[in-house]
Amino acid sequence: MRPRPFVNWARNQRSWPRHRHAPASEVEIVDLVRAVRARGEHLRVVGAGHSWSAAPVTDQHLVTLDRHARVVRVDREARRVTVAAGMRLRDLTVALDREGLALENLGSISEQSVAGAIATGTHGTGLGHGVLATQVVALRLVTGTGEVRVLGEGDGDLLDAARVSLGALGVVSEVTLRVRDTFDLEERAWSLPFDDACRALPELAREHAQLKAWWLPHTGRVQLFAYAPTQAARHGTGPVRRALDAAVNRVAFTGVLGLGRAAPGLIPSLSRLVGKTYFHARRRVDRSDRLLNVAMPPRHLEMEYGLPLAATTEAWRATKRLIERERLRVNFVQEARFVAADACHLSPAYQRESCQLGAYMAPSADLERYFRGFEAIALGLDGRPHWGKIFHARAAELAPRYPRWDRFQALRRELDPDGVFVSEFLREVLG
């Protein structure tokens, strides 16, 4: 009987692992790693399957931590929460809110597992905030020999490697995160002409605590979203509004994408219609996670590169030129978000403030040319890929972009001497 396939959320990655495992404790994880090592085989851990890259793909042992997903302890005085690594971000935000606490920053989607989100360098936005992994103050790591390493803030170099590790150093079994008191945000949205937005983005990113920008190709405007802490009364949100946003994404936007797929020539006109409908000024106030997270979008593919902040304007202008020159029909937004410099060895924001520029697209005839062209632009501007999204760059091209690359490789050999966590993906991107 052929093994049951693994398929990720976007349905662009598929494999047939021979063995599936769902350990419910760290002890079971240790036993599994030791057994796989003794057999000279390999394992990979999958979180929620929300990576567009092949990071979790394996044809041998696939491990899910869905049964190892809970709040272990909350230290309100120290503002720390410890969770079993399989816990979903969406469940963690709810659990924290019951304690009057919140994560400092979040990405757009909260479906990921905690361990998966940090391992791939997932991030939110704001030059005062690093990738989500920078909120990690301690973790427990089951190495390739089955040893449990407890890493804290005194283990700076090793902790920085393990925070964004692609699963190459071991299985993260437990994570301790820095949190804060629960807080509300005000979202202010407005639009600017494309050229004005391109020119202003780096400065706007410094002016606002948290800023993101959406450009829908074939339209002449960019929609900006700025977030700031507030004590104002909540408004413009609520269960009905959230349900409506979800319905628009699930039904209306999906329908527009389907129409564009059936008749690609309509994509520019459909994009302009979506822009006129959605890109307008508004203000909302709500709990932080409800504004930083967005309603789940229709299935699509994503490529994203972290660029030096100063390259933001040129990257967007070059992408616009690419679309016009190649007459590409692009049916999804490009998104710019901003991330503080950090010390995580494989982070796209290692030692530099970054613009995380994402090119998104639902399946369409021009997708491959669009992504290849965008990637060439990003690599030419010293870009580093988001590990959880689509990219084609390989180890030889990636290594010079990460000053701590050799140190990470040394730790990889030390912690996984027999290659228990090796996969085709890791061979390609890490060597």
Image: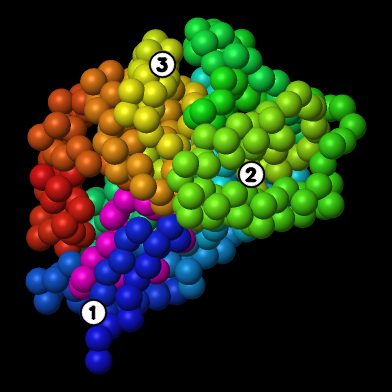
Stretch of the chain drawn in magenta: 47-64
Q: Is residue 223 a member of the stretch shown in magenta?
A: no
Of the 4 image quadrants, the one containing the N terminus is bottom left
Q: Earlier in the sequence, mark 3 or mark 1?
A: 1
Q: Where's residue 49, x and y in %?
A: 42, 60
- Nearer the observer, 22 or 159: 22
**Given the image, on which type of amino acid does mark 1 rest?**
Arg
Q: Where's residue 198, x and y in %?
A: 50, 13
Instruction: Identify the residue at image location x=21%, y=71%.
Output: 59
Q: Is residue 186 above or below residue 171?
A: above
Q: Which residue is mark 2?
A: 294
Residue 18 in the figure: left or right of residue 222: left
Q: Secondary structure at mark 3?
A: helix
Q: Main secondary structure of the magenta part?
A: loop
For disc 2, the neighbor class at 10 Å (few under 14, some 14 to 19, many from 20) is some
Instruction: Identify the residue at image location x=27%, y=69%.
Output: 15
Q: Secondary structure at mark 1?
A: loop
Q: Earlier in the sequence, mark 3 or mark 2?
A: 2
Q: Where's residue 207, x and y in %?
A: 61, 10
The quadrant holding residue 23 is bottom left
Cα–Cα gap, marks 1 and 2 = 36 Å
Q: Earlier in the sequence, mark 1 or mark 2?
A: 1
**Given the image, on which type of amino acid does mark 3 rest?**
Arg
